[in-house]
């Protein structure tokens, strides 16, 4: 996924690092989604500072960097971890300020150090960039046409596709659609980004089971109609683009 697609982590992801975080947030009336978004904003500013300060001579898009912002930054595993521990730092900092509890202060300091180390590791490893960013798709719209299939609940995701081998964006949030008996579903992706040339449709019969249903990208302005034979066992949806290049210490390094 791209950094501009939204928060790199969810509240459930935070539990990997801090199993009690939901209880702490509930007890201290801290909105975790707000803190996740705040951490994303702070990290985005930090990354943009790096890109502006250290890539002027090597970033081919340096002249457009202020306009681009961080729209081409990929959420790498290193960046995802940084975001998680930085969010926990913010949460425990707020919890300490609310209660002046020594335990919260210790946790705040712990995650501050973890966040600092994660930031340094992310910058050393490199900020991943893509040449043609494809944002996460919005949930699609649905309709149906007459067909031979029974009433069925489908789980659906769509992705935007651009040109090139690394130009499929992150999938939309999982959406359910109940198709009535004697019909087949019709799926339409909405609000295409400028770089998109089409979209892919992933469908399944249970949560998390979506696989690719179309053999080639569906052109913009068209819809996907499930064939009368029903679902096919295609490839599962990915998580979005991987970096084409990395910015490390002012140098632009090609992937591979």
Image (spheres, rainbow, N blue to C red):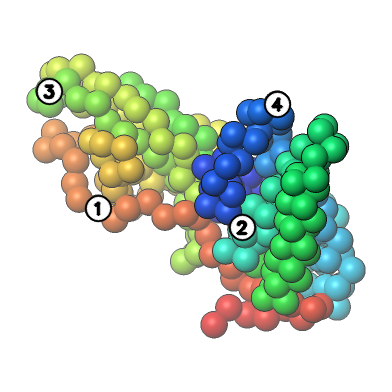
Residues under numbered marks 3 and 2 in contact, where contact means CB atoms less than 8 Å apart: no
**Vertical comparison of 190 with 50: above or below:** above
Within 10 Å of disc 4 (Cα), the crowding (few <14, some 14-19, many 20+) is: few
**Cα gap from disc 1 to disc 3, whole angstroms:** 21 Å
Within 10 Å of disc 3 (Cα), the crowding (few <14, some 14-19, many 20+) is: few
Counting the numbered discs, the total is 4
The earlier-in-sequence mark between 1 and 2 is: 2
Q: Secondary structure at mark 1?
A: loop
The earlier-in-sequence mark between 1 and 4 is: 4
Q: Which residue is identified by label 4?
A: 29
The earlier-in-sequence mark between 4 and 3 is: 4
Query: Which of the two marks, 4 or 2, is nearer to us in this view?
Result: 4
**Cα gap from disc 4 to disc 2, whole angstroms:** 25 Å
Q: Which residue is identified by label 1?
A: 234
**Vertical comparison of 237 with 231: above or below:** below
Residue 56 visible at all: yes
Q: Secondary structure at mark 4?
A: loop
**Cα gap from disc 1 to disc 4, whole angstroms:** 44 Å
Query: Which of the two marks, 4 or 3, is nearer to us in this view?
Result: 4
* Depth order, front residue of 226/48: 48
Q: Secondary structure at mark 3?
A: loop
Say whether residue 104 is left or right of residue 231.
right
The quadrant where residue 154 appears? top left
Say whether residue 89 is left or right of residue 235.
right
Q: Percent from the top left, x then y, of residue 176?
A: 34, 27
Say whether residue 124 is left or right of residue 139.
right
């Amino acid at each position: 996924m791209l950094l501009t697609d939204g928060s790199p982590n969810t509240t459930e992801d935070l539990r990997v690092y801090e199993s009690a975080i939901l209880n702490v947030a509930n007890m201290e009336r801290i909105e975790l989604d707000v803190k996740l978004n705040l951490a994303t904003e702070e990290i985005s500013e930090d990354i943009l500072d790096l890109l502006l300060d250290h890539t002027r001579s090597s970033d081919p898009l340096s002249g457009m960097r202020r306009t681009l912002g961080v729209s081409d930054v990929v959420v790498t595993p290193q960046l995802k971890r940084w975001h998680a521990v930085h969010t926990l730092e913010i949460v425990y900092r707020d919890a300490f300020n609310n209660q002046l509890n020594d335990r919260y202060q210790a946790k705040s300091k712990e995650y501050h150090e973890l966040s600092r180390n994660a930031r340094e590791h992310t910058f050393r490893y490199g900020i991943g960039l893509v040449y043609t960013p494809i944002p996460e798709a919005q949930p699609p719209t649905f309709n149906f046409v007459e067909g031979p299939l029974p009433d069925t609940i489908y789980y659906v995701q769509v992705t935007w596709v651009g040109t090139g081998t690394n130009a499929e964006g992150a999938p939309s949030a999982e959406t359910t659609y109940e198709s009535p008996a004697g019909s087949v579903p019709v799926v339409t992706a909405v609000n295409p980004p400028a770089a998109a040339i089409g979209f892919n449709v992933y469908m399944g019969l249970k949560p998390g089971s979506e696989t690719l249903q179309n053999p080639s990208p569906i052109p913009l302005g068209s819809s996907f109609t499930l064939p009368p034979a029903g679902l096919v066992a295609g490839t599962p949806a990915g998580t979005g683009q991987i970096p084409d290049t990395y910015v490390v210490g002012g140098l632009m390094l090609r992937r591979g």
